[in-house]
Amino acid sequence: MTALAELLANATAGTARLADPTGATASINFVAAARLLTAVADDTNTLSLNADDFAQRTVTAESADAETVIVQVGPLRYLVSTDGIDVLRLCTVAGCERECIDPGSLLTRVCTEHLDVDDSQISNPRGIRAVRLDAWQQLAEDRARTARGDLDVAGKLRDQ
Ligand SMILES: [Zn+2]
């Protein structure tokens, strides 16, 4: 277990090593540590999670090898390539290596295979699957609205 700030400091010094429960390790470079920190910061903001002691949040390695490491930071999971090229947001179900369907909401931080997995925070007579699909649709509609607005503005500016 390492705090985010400690991980970044170690990566700056060139020695950021994360060990999984089996003892396997991954050495991540500065770009990987910085991109992970940025992803956690963005998600903390997007998901309205408590940002207190952000840098002291614990990074736990679930599995590690020479190329990638899967880390858990609070409820969120990420797959980080040790060279820093990829930082993927994973499904929040432990052990799942698929990307989440949408990083915009805690409800949609599962993959398509895990839409039905129970969440103790949510009780809804229609079931968790319907709640998650509603949340995903809402996020997609918000983005579509923004994209339509951009297209309108671009079109108007072109016509001027
Ligand atoms: Zn999953």
Image (tube, grey):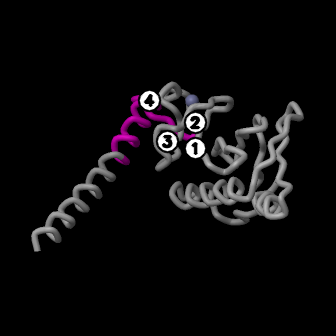
Badge 2 or badge 3: first in the primary sequence: 2
Residue under label 4: 129
N-term-proximal mark, 2 vs 4: 2
Residue at the far right: name it: 23
> Disc 2 designates what residue?
91
Give the amino acid type for the residue marked by disc 2 in the picture: Cys
Q: Earlier in the sequence, mark 4 or mark 1?
A: 1
Rendered image: mark on residue 107: 3
Question: Which residue lies under the disc numbered 1?
Answer: 89
Mark 2 Cβ inside 8 Å of ligand 1 = yes
Q: Position of residue 64 (x, y in %)?
A: 78, 36
User: Could you tell me residue 130's position as x and y percent?
Assistant: 39, 31
The amino acid at mark 4 is: Arg
Cα gap from disc 2 to disc 4, whole angstroms: 14 Å
Q: Is residue 130 magenta?
A: yes
**As drawn, 108 above or below 57:** above
Q: CA distance from mark 2 to mark 3?
A: 10 Å
Mark 1 or 3, nearer chain start: 1
Q: Position of residue 113 (x, y in %)?
A: 51, 25
- Number of the front mark, 4 or 1: 1
Residue shown at the point (16%, 63%) measured from the top left? 155
Query: Dot 1: what SS?
Result: strand
